Image: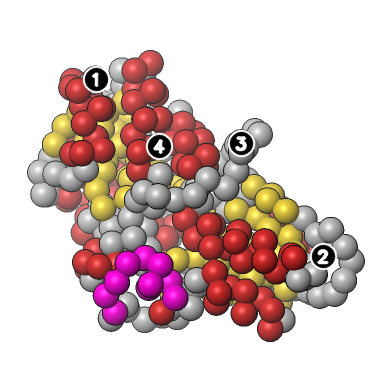
Protein backbone atom coordinates (compact mmCIF):
# COMPACT_ATOMS: atom_id res chain seq x y z
CA UNK A 1 0.00 0.00 0.00
CA UNK A 2 2.81 2.40 0.88
CA UNK A 3 4.46 2.13 -2.54
CA UNK A 4 1.08 2.40 -4.27
CA UNK A 5 0.31 5.57 -2.34
CA UNK A 6 3.62 7.21 -3.27
CA UNK A 7 3.33 6.30 -6.96
CA UNK A 8 -0.22 7.59 -7.12
CA UNK A 9 0.57 10.80 -5.25
CA UNK A 10 3.49 11.46 -7.59
CA UNK A 11 1.20 11.06 -10.59
CA UNK A 12 -1.28 13.51 -9.10
CA UNK A 13 1.40 16.00 -8.04
CA UNK A 14 2.98 16.04 -11.49
CA UNK A 15 -0.26 17.41 -12.92
CA UNK A 16 -1.16 19.59 -9.94
CA UNK A 17 1.59 21.86 -8.61
CA UNK A 18 -0.53 22.70 -5.55
CA UNK A 19 0.11 19.26 -4.06
CA UNK A 20 2.80 19.18 -1.36
CA UNK A 21 4.21 16.23 0.59
CA UNK A 22 5.60 16.84 4.09
CA UNK A 23 7.29 14.00 5.95
CA UNK A 24 8.12 13.73 9.63
CA UNK A 25 11.66 12.51 8.90
CA UNK A 26 10.46 9.06 7.81
CA UNK A 27 9.94 7.03 4.66
CA UNK A 28 13.03 8.08 2.75
CA UNK A 29 13.46 4.80 0.89
CA UNK A 30 9.91 4.81 -0.43
CA UNK A 31 9.60 8.61 -0.84
CA UNK A 32 12.80 8.99 -2.87
CA UNK A 33 11.08 8.81 -6.30
CA UNK A 34 8.76 11.63 -5.23
CA UNK A 35 11.36 14.05 -3.92
CA UNK A 36 13.72 13.41 -6.82
CA UNK A 37 10.96 14.17 -9.32
CA UNK A 38 9.37 17.08 -7.43
CA UNK A 39 11.86 18.57 -4.96
CA UNK A 40 9.97 21.87 -4.82
CA UNK A 41 6.81 20.07 -3.69
CA UNK A 42 8.49 18.17 -0.83
CA UNK A 43 9.48 19.15 2.71
CA UNK A 44 11.08 17.21 5.55
CA UNK A 45 9.73 18.75 8.76
CA UNK A 46 11.95 16.59 10.95
CA UNK A 47 10.87 14.54 13.95
CA UNK A 48 8.40 17.26 14.91
CA UNK A 49 4.94 16.04 14.02
CA UNK A 50 3.14 18.88 15.81
CA UNK A 51 5.15 21.45 13.86
CA UNK A 52 4.63 19.43 10.67
CA UNK A 53 0.85 19.57 11.09
CA UNK A 54 0.73 23.30 11.81
CA UNK A 55 3.06 23.92 8.87
CA UNK A 56 0.74 21.88 6.65
CA UNK A 57 -2.30 23.83 7.86
CA UNK A 58 -0.60 27.13 7.05
CA UNK A 59 0.36 25.94 3.59
CA UNK A 60 -3.18 24.68 2.99
CA UNK A 61 -4.70 28.01 4.01
CA UNK A 62 -2.45 29.63 1.38
CA UNK A 63 -3.96 27.39 -1.31
CA UNK A 64 -1.88 24.20 -1.19
CA UNK A 65 -3.08 20.58 -0.97
CA UNK A 66 -0.81 19.16 1.71
CA UNK A 67 -0.12 15.51 2.58
CA UNK A 68 1.59 14.86 5.91
CA UNK A 69 3.33 11.49 6.21
CA UNK A 70 4.56 9.36 9.09
CA UNK A 71 4.08 5.95 10.70
CA UNK A 72 1.75 4.50 13.31
CA UNK A 73 0.55 6.97 15.90
CA UNK A 74 3.03 9.71 15.02
CA UNK A 75 1.01 11.74 12.45
CA UNK A 76 -2.22 11.37 14.47
CA UNK A 77 -2.15 11.01 18.25
CA UNK A 78 1.13 12.84 18.76
CA UNK A 79 -0.28 15.94 17.05
CA UNK A 80 -3.99 15.56 17.74
CA UNK A 81 -4.40 19.11 19.06
CA UNK A 82 -2.87 20.54 15.89
CA UNK A 83 -5.10 18.38 13.69
CA UNK A 84 -8.13 19.56 15.64
CA UNK A 85 -7.33 23.25 16.04
CA UNK A 86 -5.26 24.04 12.95
CA UNK A 87 -6.67 21.67 10.32
CA UNK A 88 -10.18 20.40 11.07
CA UNK A 89 -11.52 23.59 12.66
CA UNK A 90 -10.56 25.58 9.55
CA UNK A 91 -11.53 22.75 7.18
CA UNK A 92 -7.98 23.07 5.85
CA UNK A 93 -6.93 21.01 2.84
CA UNK A 94 -4.58 18.73 4.79
CA UNK A 95 -4.41 14.98 4.17
CA UNK A 96 -2.95 13.07 7.12
CA UNK A 97 -1.29 9.83 6.03
CA UNK A 98 -0.53 7.05 8.52
CA UNK A 99 1.58 4.19 7.22
CA UNK A 100 1.21 1.19 9.47
CA UNK A 101 -2.37 1.03 10.71
CA UNK A 102 -3.06 -1.62 13.34
CA UNK A 103 -0.30 -4.10 14.12
CA UNK A 104 1.98 -3.39 11.13
CA UNK A 105 4.82 -2.23 13.39
CA UNK A 106 4.08 -4.92 15.94
CA UNK A 107 7.70 -5.76 16.60
CA UNK A 108 8.30 -2.20 17.84
CA UNK A 109 5.65 -2.39 20.55
CA UNK A 110 2.43 -0.54 21.31
CA UNK A 111 4.04 2.93 21.01
CA UNK A 112 4.27 2.33 17.23
CA UNK A 113 0.86 0.67 16.81
CA UNK A 114 -2.17 2.57 15.53
CA UNK A 115 -5.09 0.88 17.28
CA UNK A 116 -7.23 3.82 18.48
CA UNK A 117 -6.72 6.19 15.55
CA UNK A 118 -9.97 5.51 13.64
CA UNK A 119 -12.09 6.19 16.73
CA UNK A 120 -10.28 9.41 17.60
CA UNK A 121 -10.02 10.88 14.10
CA UNK A 122 -13.62 10.08 13.14
CA UNK A 123 -14.82 11.96 16.23
CA UNK A 124 -13.40 15.23 14.87
CA UNK A 125 -15.82 17.33 12.82
CA UNK A 126 -14.77 18.03 9.21
CA UNK A 127 -12.42 15.01 9.05
CA UNK A 128 -12.95 12.32 6.41
CA UNK A 129 -11.55 8.91 7.49
CA UNK A 130 -10.38 6.55 4.73
CA UNK A 131 -8.95 3.08 5.39
CA UNK A 132 -8.31 1.24 2.10
CA UNK A 133 -8.24 -2.54 2.17
CA UNK A 134 -5.91 -3.39 -0.71
CA UNK A 135 -3.68 -1.85 -3.39
CA UNK A 136 -6.56 -0.95 -5.70
CA UNK A 137 -8.45 0.79 -2.92
CA UNK A 138 -5.27 2.60 -1.83
CA UNK A 139 -4.70 3.96 -5.34
CA UNK A 140 -8.28 5.09 -5.79
CA UNK A 141 -8.46 6.60 -2.30
CA UNK A 142 -5.26 8.61 -2.83
CA UNK A 143 -6.60 10.06 -6.07
CA UNK A 144 -9.95 10.82 -4.48
CA UNK A 145 -8.67 12.70 -1.43
CA UNK A 146 -6.13 14.62 -3.53
CA UNK A 147 -9.05 16.03 -5.48
CA UNK A 148 -11.53 16.73 -2.68
CA UNK A 149 -11.47 19.68 -0.27
CA UNK A 150 -11.01 19.52 3.47
CA UNK A 151 -9.11 17.55 6.08
CA UNK A 152 -8.76 13.81 5.46
CA UNK A 153 -7.15 10.90 7.25
CA UNK A 154 -5.69 8.13 5.08
CA UNK A 155 -4.82 4.98 7.04
CA UNK A 156 -2.58 2.60 5.12
CA UNK A 157 -0.88 -0.71 5.65
CA UNK A 158 2.85 -0.88 5.01
CA UNK A 159 3.84 -3.31 2.31
CA UNK A 160 3.13 -6.81 1.08
CA UNK A 161 -0.66 -6.47 1.20
CA UNK A 162 -2.52 -8.65 -1.25
CA UNK A 163 -4.47 -7.29 -4.18
CA UNK A 164 -8.09 -8.30 -3.62
CA UNK A 165 -9.87 -6.35 -6.37
CA UNK A 166 -9.08 -6.56 -10.08
CA UNK A 167 -10.50 -3.08 -10.37
CA UNK A 168 -13.19 -0.95 -8.76
CA UNK A 169 -15.79 0.60 -11.00
CA UNK A 170 -16.90 4.08 -9.95
CA UNK A 171 -14.88 4.27 -6.72
CA UNK A 172 -16.49 6.79 -4.39
CA UNK A 173 -15.53 8.08 -0.95
CA UNK A 174 -18.25 6.92 1.45
CA UNK A 175 -19.43 4.00 -0.70
CA UNK A 176 -18.57 0.43 0.34
CA UNK A 177 -17.37 -2.08 -2.26
CA UNK A 178 -19.33 -5.32 -2.69
CA UNK A 179 -16.97 -8.30 -2.93
CA UNK A 180 -19.45 -11.18 -2.87
CA UNK A 181 -23.15 -11.76 -2.44
CA UNK A 182 -24.92 -14.86 -1.17
CA UNK A 183 -25.32 -17.58 -3.79
CA UNK A 184 -27.95 -19.67 -2.05
CA UNK A 185 -30.75 -19.22 0.44
CA UNK A 186 -29.61 -21.19 3.45
CA UNK A 187 -29.98 -19.63 6.86
CA UNK A 188 -28.62 -17.66 8.62
CA UNK A 189 -27.76 -14.89 6.21
CA UNK A 190 -24.52 -13.21 7.20
CA UNK A 191 -22.94 -9.94 5.99
CA UNK A 192 -19.22 -9.51 6.60
CA UNK A 193 -17.93 -5.92 6.74
CA UNK A 194 -14.27 -4.99 7.08
CA UNK A 195 -12.18 -1.87 6.90
CA UNK A 196 -8.48 -1.47 6.23
CA UNK A 197 -5.79 -4.02 5.44
CA UNK A 198 -7.51 -6.77 7.46
CA UNK A 199 -9.43 -7.24 4.20
CA UNK A 200 -6.97 -9.95 3.17
CA UNK A 201 -7.70 -12.21 6.17
CA UNK A 202 -11.41 -11.41 5.95
CA UNK A 203 -11.53 -12.38 2.28
CA UNK A 204 -9.55 -15.60 2.74
CA UNK A 205 -11.84 -16.56 5.63
CA UNK A 206 -14.93 -15.86 3.53
CA UNK A 207 -13.52 -17.92 0.66
CA UNK A 208 -13.14 -20.94 2.94
CA UNK A 209 -16.51 -20.47 4.63
CA UNK A 210 -18.28 -20.17 1.29
CA UNK A 211 -16.81 -23.53 0.25
CA UNK A 212 -18.39 -25.02 3.37
CA UNK A 213 -21.81 -23.76 2.28
CA UNK A 214 -22.08 -20.80 4.66
CA UNK A 215 -24.27 -18.05 3.25
CA UNK A 216 -22.21 -14.84 3.04
CA UNK A 217 -22.25 -11.32 1.73
CA UNK A 218 -18.98 -9.38 1.93
CA UNK A 219 -18.25 -5.67 1.73
CA UNK A 220 -15.06 -3.66 2.04
CA UNK A 221 -15.64 -0.31 3.76
CA UNK A 222 -12.69 1.76 2.58
CA UNK A 223 -14.37 4.82 4.13
CA UNK A 224 -15.32 4.91 7.80
CA UNK A 225 -16.44 8.55 7.74
CA UNK A 226 -18.71 9.31 5.98
CA UNK A 227 -19.84 5.71 6.30
CA UNK A 228 -22.05 3.96 3.76
CA UNK A 229 -25.36 4.15 5.62
CA UNK A 230 -27.39 2.78 2.72
CA UNK A 231 -25.47 -0.51 2.62
CA UNK A 232 -25.63 -0.87 6.40
CA UNK A 233 -29.38 -0.21 6.47
CA UNK A 234 -29.99 -2.68 3.64
CA UNK A 235 -28.04 -5.45 5.38
CA UNK A 236 -29.65 -4.66 8.75
CA UNK A 237 -33.06 -5.28 7.20
CA UNK A 238 -32.13 -8.33 5.13
CA UNK A 239 -29.51 -10.24 7.15
CA UNK A 240 -29.50 -12.22 10.36
CA UNK A 241 -25.99 -11.16 11.34
CA UNK A 242 -23.55 -8.40 10.46
CA UNK A 243 -19.94 -9.19 11.37
CA UNK A 244 -17.55 -6.22 11.47
CA UNK A 245 -13.80 -6.81 11.31
CA UNK A 246 -11.13 -4.22 12.06
CA UNK A 247 -7.49 -4.15 13.13
CA UNK A 248 -8.37 -1.58 15.76
CA UNK A 249 -9.97 -1.28 19.17
CA UNK A 250 -13.66 -2.23 19.01
CA UNK A 251 -14.48 0.83 21.16
CA UNK A 252 -15.34 3.77 18.93
CA UNK A 253 -13.95 2.28 15.74
CA UNK A 254 -15.47 0.80 12.60
CA UNK A 255 -17.79 -1.62 14.40
CA UNK A 256 -19.06 1.22 16.55
CA UNK A 257 -19.74 3.33 13.45
CA UNK A 258 -21.77 0.48 11.94
CA UNK A 259 -23.63 -0.01 15.24
CA UNK A 260 -24.62 3.66 15.31
CA UNK A 261 -26.35 3.30 11.95
CA UNK A 262 -27.97 -0.03 12.84
CA UNK A 263 -29.42 1.44 16.05
CA UNK A 264 -31.57 3.77 13.96
CA UNK A 265 -32.98 0.98 11.77
CA UNK A 266 -35.80 -1.34 12.83
CA UNK A 267 -34.07 -4.37 11.34
CA UNK A 268 -33.45 -7.95 12.38
CA UNK A 269 -29.66 -8.19 12.09
CA UNK A 270 -27.51 -8.72 15.17
CA UNK A 271 -24.01 -7.21 15.08
CA UNK A 272 -20.87 -9.15 15.96
CA UNK A 273 -17.82 -6.87 16.32
CA UNK A 274 -14.38 -8.37 15.80
CA UNK A 275 -11.35 -6.30 16.71
CA UNK A 276 -9.04 -5.63 19.63
CA UNK A 277 -11.11 -6.06 22.76
CA UNK A 278 -10.37 -2.72 24.45
CA UNK A 279 -6.86 -3.57 25.58
CA UNK A 280 -3.31 -2.56 24.77
CA UNK A 281 -1.08 -5.00 22.96
CA UNK A 282 1.46 -6.37 25.43
CA UNK A 283 2.92 -8.98 23.08
CA UNK A 284 5.68 -8.40 20.54
CA UNK A 285 5.76 -9.94 17.09
CA UNK A 286 4.89 -9.41 13.47
CA UNK A 287 1.46 -8.44 12.20
CA UNK A 288 0.35 -12.00 11.42
CA UNK A 289 1.36 -13.22 14.88
CA UNK A 290 -0.45 -10.39 16.65
CA UNK A 291 -3.61 -10.87 14.62
CA UNK A 292 -3.63 -14.47 15.83
CA UNK A 293 -2.94 -13.47 19.44
CA UNK A 294 -5.75 -10.91 19.51
CA UNK A 295 -8.39 -12.93 17.68
CA UNK A 296 -8.61 -11.26 14.27
CA UNK A 297 -6.70 -13.75 12.10
CA UNK A 298 -8.20 -15.72 9.22
CA UNK A 299 -8.74 -18.68 11.51
CA UNK A 300 -10.38 -16.60 14.22
CA UNK A 301 -12.73 -15.03 11.68
CA UNK A 302 -13.70 -18.46 10.35
CA UNK A 303 -14.39 -19.79 13.85
CA UNK A 304 -16.46 -16.78 14.91
CA UNK A 305 -18.64 -16.83 11.78
CA UNK A 306 -18.84 -20.62 11.84
CA UNK A 307 -20.20 -20.47 15.39
CA UNK A 308 -23.13 -18.38 14.17
Instruction: Judge depth for marks 2 and 4 and give the one in front.
Output: 4
Q: Which residues are magenta?
A: 283-292
Distance from the alpha carbon under mark 4 to that under mark 1: 16 Å
- What scheme was used to colour the molecule? secondary structure
Q: What crowding class fits label 4: few (fewer than 14 Cα within 10 Å), some (14-19), or many (20 or more)?
A: some
Give yes or no for residue 270 being in the magenta stretch.
no
- Look at the magenta stretch and give its main secondary structure: helix
**Dot 2 and dot 3 residues touching (CB under 8 Å):** no
**Residue under the image location 43 percent in, 36 percent down:** 142
Residue that label 4 marks: 4
- Mark closest to the chain's N terminus, 4 or 1: 4
Instruction: Judge depth for marks 2 and 3 and give the one in front.
Output: 3
Give yes or no for residue 290 being in the magenta stretch.
yes
Q: Residue 37: give its label.
A: 1
- Mark closest to the chain's N terminus, 1 or 3: 1
Label 1: element kind: helix
- Mark closest to the chain's N terminus, 2 or 3: 3
Amino acid sequence: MRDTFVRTLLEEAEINSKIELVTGDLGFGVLKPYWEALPDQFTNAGIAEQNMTTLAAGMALEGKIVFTYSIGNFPTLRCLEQIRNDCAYHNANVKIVCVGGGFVYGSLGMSHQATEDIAILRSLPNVTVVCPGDLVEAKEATKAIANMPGTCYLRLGRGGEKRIHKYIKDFEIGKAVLIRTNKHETSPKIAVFSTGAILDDATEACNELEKKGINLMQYSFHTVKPIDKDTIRKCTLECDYIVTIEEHNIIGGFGSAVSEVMSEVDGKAKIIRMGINDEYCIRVGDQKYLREQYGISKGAIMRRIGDL
